[in-house]
Image (cartoon, rainbow, N blue to C red):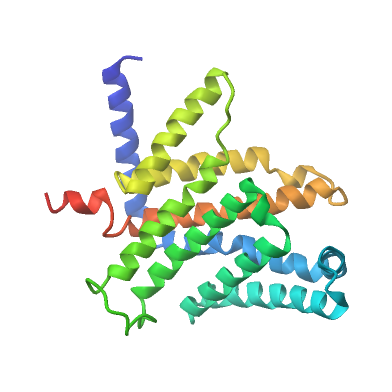
Amino acid sequence: MGQNDMMGAAEDFADQAAAFLRVTKQYLPHVARLCLISTFLEDGIRMWFQWSEQRDYIEATWSCGYFLATIFVLVNLLGQLGGCILVLSRNFVQYACFGLFGIIAMQTIAYSILWDLKFLMRNLALGGGLLLLLAESRSEGKSMFAGVPTMGESSPKQYMQLGGRVLLVLMFMTLLHFDASFISILQNIVGTALIILVAIGFKTKLAALTLVVWLFAVNVYFNAFWNIPAYKPMHDFLKYDFFQTLSVIGGLLLVVALGPGGVSMDEKKKEW
């Protein structure tokens, strides 16, 4: 394929992506929010059905006693399910986001994720999705930061969008494969280029939509928990990974729906 053919194919993809965004403009934010909270919803339900196992694990790991271990599981269950209900109903979304931030921090410590770089980066990416959701909620209601002095009316929202974008791309850094095969090298080059574009906010919607397609394909292929019997530990592991990845997809869909925000090259180009 020549350079002109490649450029033509890229332009065709860009045109198709633009048409897709026009058609789905009204529905995309709703789909994004549902995907984003999916990991909290799944984990909250898991806390209910695996109550004893989760409590016993925390009690054995931290030697905190039956009562505190039960409180931990209860907070996770109510905090996650309650936060999901508030986000989906569009009520007190900002408070729900802060509650879910707390759940991420608590689980990071309780399950020793802090010392596992891959899982830590994925949790940070999940936090990036919540930052974007928090930024979206600022434009729909009264700001929780009304008394904080800013350089502009939407400045906190813009920096939350920047932080959310940067944290989201951490998910893709865990998918890079460092081997000499042609497919891995190509995937690393293309993936790295796309995550840089999202992070700096250049051609953001197109790059984020491309990452959504790529990440969804990788997620369905590598985290197919439905192919593993429910009694095997790998079933729960893949299921957790699947929904966590789906939440990051939700964060990227928010970027696609809402744009990169004011702190981005796309926005700066309008001033040039």
Q: Based on the displayed image, in which of its 4 quarters is residue 109 positioned?
A: bottom right
Can residue 40 be seen here? yes
Find residue 23 and report its horizontal and vertical position in percent.
35, 53
4 lies left or right of 166 = left
31 lies left or right of 48 = left
Find residue 102 and report its horizontal and vertical position in percent.
59, 72
Q: In this view, does 212 lie above or below 41?
A: above
Q: Based on the displayed image, in which of its 4 quarters is residue 2 positioned?
A: top left
Find residue 16 and report its horizontal and vertical position in percent.
34, 40
235 lies left or right of 60 = left
Q: In this view, does 165 lie above or below 194?
A: below
Q: How many marks?
A: 0
168 lies left or right of 71 = left
Q: In this view, does 87 lie above or below 37?
A: below
Can residue 42 be seen here? no
Q: In which quarter of the image is the N terminus?
A: top left
Q: Residue at x 29, y 18 (%)?
A: 3
Report the front residue among 27 and 137: 137
Q: Which residue lies furthest to the left in this view?
A: 272
Q: Residue at x 71, y 52 (%)?
A: 239
Find residue 56 and report its horizontal and vertical position in percent.
87, 67
Q: Residue at x 54, y 56 (%)?
A: 124
Q: Which residue is drawn at 33% across and 70% down?
A: 156
